[in-house]
Image (cartoon, rainbow, N blue to C red):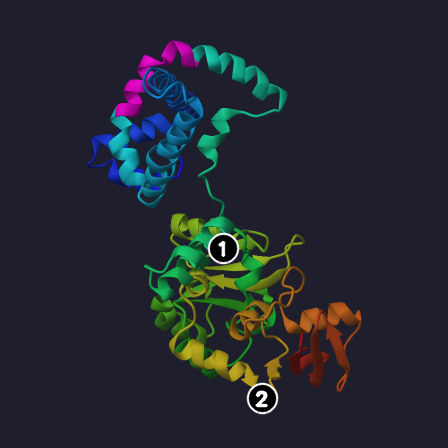
Amino acid sequence: MMASNKIKLNNLSKDSKGSRRALKLLQRPDILLASILIANNFANILASALVTIIMIDYFDGNVLLGSILLTLVILVFSEITPKTIASVYPENFATKSSGVLNILVVIFKPLVWLTNILSSRILKIFNVDPMQSASNDNLNSDELRTLLEEHGDLIPAQSREMLSSILGMEELTVEDIMTPHAEIIGIDITQSFEAAKKIIGSSYYSRLPVFQESIDQVIGMLHLKDSHQFMEAFEAGQDVKNILFDATFISQSTTISTQLSQFQKQDNNLSLVVDEYGEIQGLLTMEDIFTEIVGKFGAAKADLEREFTIKRDGSLIADGNSKVRELNNFMDWDIAEDGSKTINGIITDYLDQIPQENVCIEINGYRIEILNIVDNSIDKVKIKKKES
């Protein structure tokens, strides 16, 4: 009963009355254990008394021989053999034995009540609540991921990875997967008509931010279905604000699971990410969340392979704006992600100054060499994990 898996029993209970009865018994493990132990001890004591009488009447009072024989019989036929079989097929035995156990619980109810009163007083001394055992089967996200890794052989590898990613959504924030401020692609109305046309024609997204000079001065969001009307107004020098819809803003500390729910409620798939001061830090789309769950594929995966170039010596060439999370996933590394989310940010935080070319540093077992600087920002770095 105690070795049975409640999830399996719950699944079996849809078609099995015995499984439903077993689950009901397991809701009060203190009463169930007390009934089993009372019956077990009663049976053992009764068997001992009967063997003693038989030994006295038929074997000249050889109680020692009777004790040895009874011990062997109980161990083989009442303990080791049945409990081993039951531990191999716990749900099957729990279902079949639930009827007998239910009867025992009813028969011994007065005695169980008395013993439970006495034992509960003792349990209080040790600050033990028997009802807590009912919540022991509740698993957190980390435990569920471990369960998937160790016992998920029947689940395809790709599905296991997706389930693991979904479980991790409670821990990840918008900042972890957003497109950084410097990489946001949008339409600058101060630029030419041709530049705007090129951006619209090459866009992967159904919505684009429209801004004046920089993304910090966003005017609104353009839906590509309105792009023809927008381009006509833009070419004619007319006001385009009435064609755009309002931009939505989200905090960079919002969890991914929360934001996914917000996207669904608002029927929106793109928002700008702001910090605690209201300054734009990046952009998040529904596609970014889906990519986090299912992984990169197609052109996105090819772009990632171009972004990270592995050298023969085991080192890696990466862009300064590359996300640390993507680097860790790509190389199966464990560079800290709790601070800055980009390689550039990690190095700048470590040096506490604007980095210089040809500078080598070591951060938590990773040797990082700055190869190129562009506009006071790291363009290319070489990273190698030290041998352990």
Residue 108 in the magenta stretch? The answer is: yes
Choose the circle earlier in sequence order: 1 or 2. 1
In the picture, which quadrant includes the C terminus?
bottom right
Q: Quadrant of residue 109?
A: top left
In the picture, which quadrant includes the N terminus?
top left
Query: With respect to residue 360, does 216 lie above or below?
Result: above
Residue most extreme to the front: 60
In the drawing, what numbered circle is on residue 168?
1
Classify residue 43 as left or right of residue 99.
right
Say if residue 1 shows up in the picture.
no
Amino acid at dot 1: Gly
Residue 171 in the magenta stretch? The answer is: no
In the drawing, what numbered circle is on residue 311?
2
Dominant SS type (magenta) = helix
Q: Quadrant of residue 163?
A: bottom left
State how far apart marks 1 and 2 are (Cα). 31 Å
Residue most extreme to the left: 15
Which residue does the image show at 67% across and 78% down from the upper left? 387
Classify residue 179 as left or right of residue 363.
left
Q: Quadrant of residue 364?
A: bottom right
Q: Check disc 1 and report its element: helix, strand or loop.
A: helix
Amino acid at dot 2: Lys
- Give, as a single range, the part of the protein colored magenta: 100-112
Label 1 environment density (alpha carbons within 10 Å; few <14, some 14–19, many ≥20):
some
Q: Position of residue 375 (x, y in %)?
A: 70, 81
